[in-house]
């Protein structure tokens, strides 16, 4: 049942790209960078497959993906920038985020943020959500958006290239990426459990 739904969803993405070209890629990648789990692996490898058949330009597909990522990053960043910080300062204790957590995160961003955000733009799943915390933590806009675009461009070129080279074997590529996504998801869940455990213990002690 789940596989059928996933296949139907992927088919919908491919239909959008086939009918609207670069604009469809921009649209889908914008959504993907707005905290919506639309797999860029499926979007961009299919675009690469179309490029291999001469139905789409390789470079246009890659740049369209990066432009969509940048647009989505703007939206997500400013959602965090204008609303997220105030929310966590006021209600953070109810979701296990204290003011000291925010202060420590601010210091971390000042020290490592630029490189970390750049690398996160090239990691499955994480790249979808990274702009929101960047906005909440008020990462330096010009540097963040520049590195975000560069990281996204590398990511998009890489996936379009995979689709271009693999052609008819995209199903195998998707299976490999799906396993990698699952690994990232498991790591994220484990880290979340550790965070929750430590903070519940901390709040009880306080």
Image (cartoon, grey):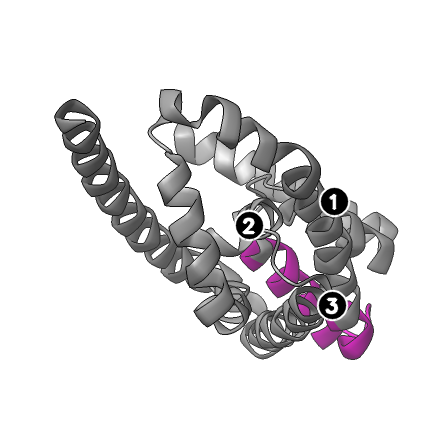
Q: Position of residue 176 (x, y in %)?
A: 37, 61
Sort mark 2 into few (<14), some (14-19) or many (20+) by Cα contacts within 10 Å: many
How far, Cα to Cα, is label 2 from label 1? 15 Å
Q: Position of residue 47 (x, y in %)?
A: 70, 63
Residue 60 sits inside the magenta stretch:
yes
Q: Position of residue 92 (x, y in %)?
A: 43, 27
Provide the residue designation for mark 3.
Answer: 142
Q: Earlier in the sequence, mark 3 or mark 2?
A: 2
- Say the numbered circle drawn on residue 145: none
How far, Cα to Cα, is label 1 from label 3? 15 Å
Q: Main secondary structure of the magenta part?
A: helix
* Quarter placement of the C terminus: top left
Q: Depth-wise, is mark 1 or mark 3 nearer the camera?
A: 3
| Viewer-closest of 74 and 136 | 136
- Residue contact at pointers 2 and 1, CB within 8 angstroms: no
Q: Helix, strand, or loop for circle 1?
A: helix
Q: Which residues are magenta?
A: 41-62
Q: Is residue 109 visible?
A: yes
| Viewer-closest of 22 and 71 | 71
Residue 205 sits inside the magenta stretch:
no
Q: Earlier in the sequence, mark 1 or mark 3?
A: 1
Provide the residue designation for mark 2.
Answer: 137
Q: Which residue ends up furthest to the front in the rendered image?
A: 206
Instruction: Locate residue 132 relative to residue 61 in the image: left or right.
Output: left
- Say the numbered circle drawn on residue 75: 1
Residue at image point 82% right, 72% down: 60
Q: Earlier in the sequence, mark 2 or mark 1?
A: 1
């Amino acid at each position: 049942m789940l596989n059928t739904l996933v296949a139907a969803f992927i088919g919908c993405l491919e239909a959008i790209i086939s009918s609207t070209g670069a604009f469809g890629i921009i649209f889908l990648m914008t959504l993907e960078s707005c905290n919506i789990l639309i797999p860029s692996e499926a979007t961009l490898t299919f675009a690469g497959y179309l490029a291999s058949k001469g139905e789409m330009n390789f470079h246009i597909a890659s740049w369209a993906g990066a432009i969509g990522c940048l647009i989505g990053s703007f939206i997500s960043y400013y959602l965090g920038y204008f609303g997220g910080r105030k929310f966590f300062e006021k209600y953070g204790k109810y979701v296990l985020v204290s003011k000291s957590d925010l202060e420590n995160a601010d210091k971390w961003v000042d020290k490592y943020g630029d490189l970390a955000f750049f690398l996160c733009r090239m990691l499955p799943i994480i790249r979808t959500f990274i702009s929101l915390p960047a906005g909440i933590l008020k990462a330096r806009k010009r540097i963040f958006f520049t590195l975000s675009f560069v990281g996204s461009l590398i990511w998009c070129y890489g996936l379009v290239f995979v689709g271009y080279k693999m052609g008819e074997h995209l199903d195998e590529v998707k299976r490999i990426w799906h396993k990698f996504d699952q690994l990232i998801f498991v790591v994220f869940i484990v880290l979340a459990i550790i965070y929750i455990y430590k903070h519940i213990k901390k709040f009880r002690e306080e």
